[in-house]
Amino acid sequence: MQGKSVSIEAQDGACHSTALGHSTLDIAIGGGLARGRLHELFAAERADSSSAAGFTAMLACLVNQGRAPLFWLREDMAERQARLYPPGLAEIGIDPERIVLVALPDPVTLLRTAVDVARCASVGVAVIEVWRSPRALDLTASRRLALAAKASGVTILLLRVEAEPGPSAAQTRWSVHAAPSTALEAGAPGRPSFIIKLLRQRGRPDGGTWHLEWDRDRSSFRDTTLSGSMVSVSLGRSLARGAPLRTG
């Protein structure tokens, strides 16, 4: 099923959402991923970091269907270790020319800049990549991000690498785990596949685990079966190599 936008009513007022393409998952989160909100995504284990990055990029692709720029903010340290790779983004369905990569020197500067970006209504989606658990990323910082997103309508995807969940103002919180994929015809590699778990959502029941695969042609997630070979990690590697994108 192709991703589409729907309107839902949240407890704190009207909220638009984007269907992810998996019917039971979309029902569980009230019709789709709420836009103009803060969402937090964790790698289930350290080895799942690349899969979490890939899943986050796919969410960004799905939510940001227009021509608005997609910002990806990360620390200089992360950029030195694993640069975003334009062809890998293109494999997902993201036009690299629409991404503004911003590398900052430390978590404090990263989060301050993230709030400024989130306040700009012309931004479509902002991915904020934070490694481990810096002091600067506390409940107050997450509230600033959540309020900025709600005021501007910018969707924020907070990608947490090698971190454990803590107090947060996020609308939803997820863990992402690499999963086997189903091989295509003639033994071709299958679509990128993930097991995701809904850890928390505001105003609705928590919990639920889904096995999804990404359909690039339809820019949508879909249900899949637990068979085939592991491909999610290779996708993550394709996102993190080569020359950097343009830096703001």
Image: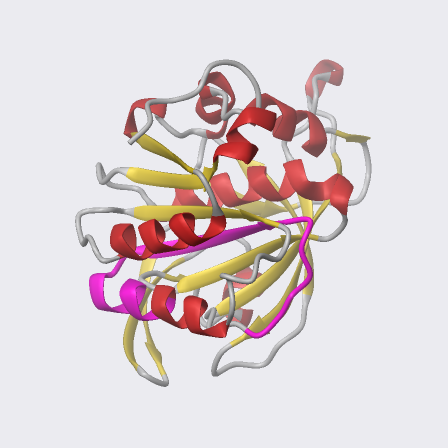
Q: Is residue 149 left or right of residue 50?
A: left
**Residue 162 screen position, x and y as percent:** 69, 49
Residue 179 in sight from this viewpoint:
no
Position of residue 171 relative to residue 214, above or below, is below
Which region of the structure is painted magenta? 146-167
**Residue 62 screen position, x and y as percent:** 40, 44
Q: Is residue 101 left or right of residue 248?
A: right
For the point 55% across and 34% down, which residue is it?
78
For the point 68% across and 45% down, which residue is it?
194
For the point 82% across and 38% down, which residue is it?
227
**Residue 17 screen position, x and y as percent:** 35, 62
The front one of 207 and 51 is 51
Q: Is residue 224 left or right of residue 180?
A: left
The front one of 42 and 209 is 42
Position of residue 242 relative to residue 13, above or below, is above
For the point 73% across and 53% down, which residue is it?
44
Residue 147 lies in the magenta stretch:
yes
Q: How many marks?
A: 0
Quadrant where the C terminus is found in the figure = top left
Quadrant housing residue 82: top right
Position of residue 122 relative to residue 28, above or below, is above
Residue 234 lies in the magenta stretch:
no
Quadrant housing residue 240: top right
The front one of 93 and 188 is 93
